[in-house]
Structure formats: C-alpha cells, structure tokens
Amino acid sequence: MELSLYLAKVWGLFIVIITFSMMINKKQIAKMYHLAKEEGMLILMGMLSLVVGILSVLSHNIWVSSWPTIITIFGWLALLKGLMFLFFPDAARRQLARCKSGTVLMLIGFLLGLYLVYVGFLA
C-alpha cells in the first residue's frame, strides 16, 4: 500500500502538471508533435516511455477494483506507448497527429491526476 500511495503522488503530480500546462498553452502540443517528426526525438521519447512503463509495471502490477488499478493502467500505457514509438514510429506519428487537439483527453487525464493526488496525499 505504501508503494501505491507513493506512485499515486508521483503519477498524479506528473499528470496534473503536464495536462494543465498543455491545456493552458496549446502551443506545447504543436511543439511536441513537431519534435516527434524527428526520428531521433521519437526514439528518445519511446525509450523514456519504455523505461517509465517497465519500472511502473514491474513494481506495481496490481489489478483490484480500486484506485491502485489506475496506477497500473498508466504504467501499462507508458510501456505500450514506448513500444509503439520504437517499433511503429509512423503509426505513433499518426496517433500524435490525431491527438493534437485532444482537449477532452487532457481533461480526463487532468481529473484522473487530481484523483491520484487526492488519494496519495489526503486519503
């Protein structure tokens, strides 16, 4: 449970900060998409996502009917994103292009991040 609370704080703060900054400054999304056009940056982004995903999944692969599952899902999503960026870069670019104006996804992520922050710090 201690690890779950720690990861709730880490993932929650990370997601809240990233999604909030992107909702406020839409230019950041365009800059990320532009960076992803560069093969080297896409590989680097994939490697970072892969490391975060592997660390998260290996340390916290908990499937219960409660909030720790959200942490597990974020870990698996990071792992899958890393694999996609590394093995299917063209598909990753197409997916990023579709998400350029993903305000609804960012809002959902922001709310999930807030929930994890609440659970991690206050529950």
Image (cartoon, helix red, strand yellow):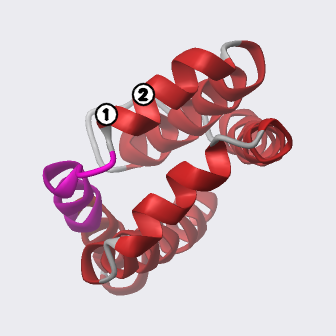
Say if mark 2 contacts mark 1, CB within 8 Å.
yes
Q: Nearer the viewer, residue 110 or 2?
A: 110
Q: Is residue 43 magenta?
A: no
Q: Is residue 104 magenta?
A: yes
**Residue 81 in the image: x percent, y percent?**
59, 31
Up-down relation of residue 62 to residue 70 (above or below):
above
Q: Residues within 10 Å of mark 1 (few under 14, many from 20)?
A: few
Residue flagged by tag 2: what amino acid is it? Gln
- Residue sitting at x 73%, y 48%: 52
* Left or right: where 40 falls relative to 15: right
Q: Nearer the viewer, residue 2 or 85?
A: 85
Q: Is residue 93 left or right of residue 49?
A: left
Q: Residue 102 placed where, x, y %?
A: 23, 49
Q: Looking at this rendering, what residue extends furthest in the left direction?
A: 104
Disc 1 is placed on an element classified as helix
Numbered tag placed on residue 98 in the rendering: 1
Rendered view: 103 above or below 43: below
Q: Which residue is disc 2 drawn over?
A: 95
Left/right placement of residue 106 relative to residue 46 reads: left
Amino acid, disc 1: Arg
Which image quadrant is residue 78 in?
top right
Q: Residue at x 31, y 72 (%)?
A: 26
Give the CA distance from mark 2 to mark 1.
5 Å
Residues shaded magenta = 100-111
The quadrant the N terminus occupies is bottom right
